[in-house]
Amino acid sequence: MFRIAQFSDLHCGETYFEASLLERAIGEINELQPDVVVCSGDLTTFGFRHEYLTAREYIDRIDCDSLVVVPGNHDSRNVGYVHFEEMFGERNSVLKKGPVAIVAVDSSEPDLDHGQIGRKEHYRPIEYPKADGKLTFDRLSSVFVSNTNHEEDQPVHLTLKDAEVPIKVNLALYDAPEQRYCPAGVYEIVDDGGSPRLQINAQNCVHCKTCDIKDPTQNINWVAPEGGGGPNYPNM
């Protein structure tokens, strides 16, 4: 008989983490004397290094020479996959033992914003109330009070890696989200002779870098503009 023991969801670092339960599970695994042990993810809660150190300590108590460990989504938080590779090795691996081959595939998603924008057909536009000028303000008025200034002859700090992507991909699949996630109205889809075109109003930019983070295709190249241009809020 070829015996495989599988466990997961240790969640070291979680508020309700019970060390005694994990110790009991490890004890039962060792009693089974399995040929292979598979730990299939979520060793940690937030992907922090100290959580990985705790998980490593417990997993080292497993009495089995053939151990497969693969990360889960919690393990990839806060670039935790870097700690995983340091303490457990490659995130994708193949273990062959006797007649059995176990393929470990990392399907976790690191917490990067640019991969989290949904397709346009799954959403409806949000109708926001018109700004009242007292408690709520329109975007261009907010840009004005930021006192951000760009010299006319300064180098362009917002460029596209591929000029066709905004229309062929971002507009077609995501309804051009750069029009909405930018707080300053920098990105605008305009009609250019009957065809849509992305217009970049770089003079509006308040240097928040949201576009560089949120662009689903990572096609926008944001570089630091010339210094001294703001934002500058003198009354804060």
Image: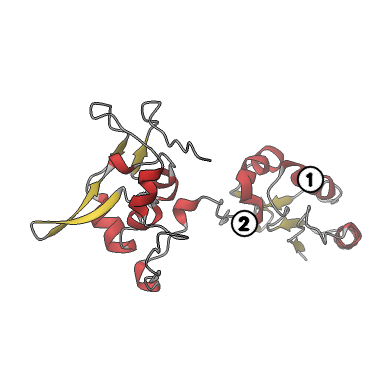
Q: Which amino acid type is marked by label 2?
A: Asn
Q: Residue furthest left?
A: 193
SS class, disc 1: helix
For the residue pair 195 and 94, the one nearer the viewer reads as 195
How crowded pointer 1 is (Cα within 10 Å; few <14, some 14-19, many 20+) is rated as some
Residue 160 shows up from this direction: no
Q: Which mark is residue 56?
A: 1
Q: Position of residue 72 (x, y in %)?
A: 64, 56
Residue that carries the numbered disc 2 in the rendered image: 73
In this rendering, would 112 be left or right of 62?
left
In this rendering, would 121 be left or right of 99?
left
Q: Which amino acid type is marked by label 1?
A: Arg
- Whether 175 is drawn above or below 164: the answer is below
Q: Residue at x 31, y 56 (%)?
A: 170
Q: Residue at x 28, y 27 (%)?
A: 155
How crowded pointer 2 is (Cα within 10 Å; few <14, some 14-19, many 20+) is rated as many
Q: Which mark is residue 177?
A: none
Q: Residue at x 13, y 58 (%)?
A: 195
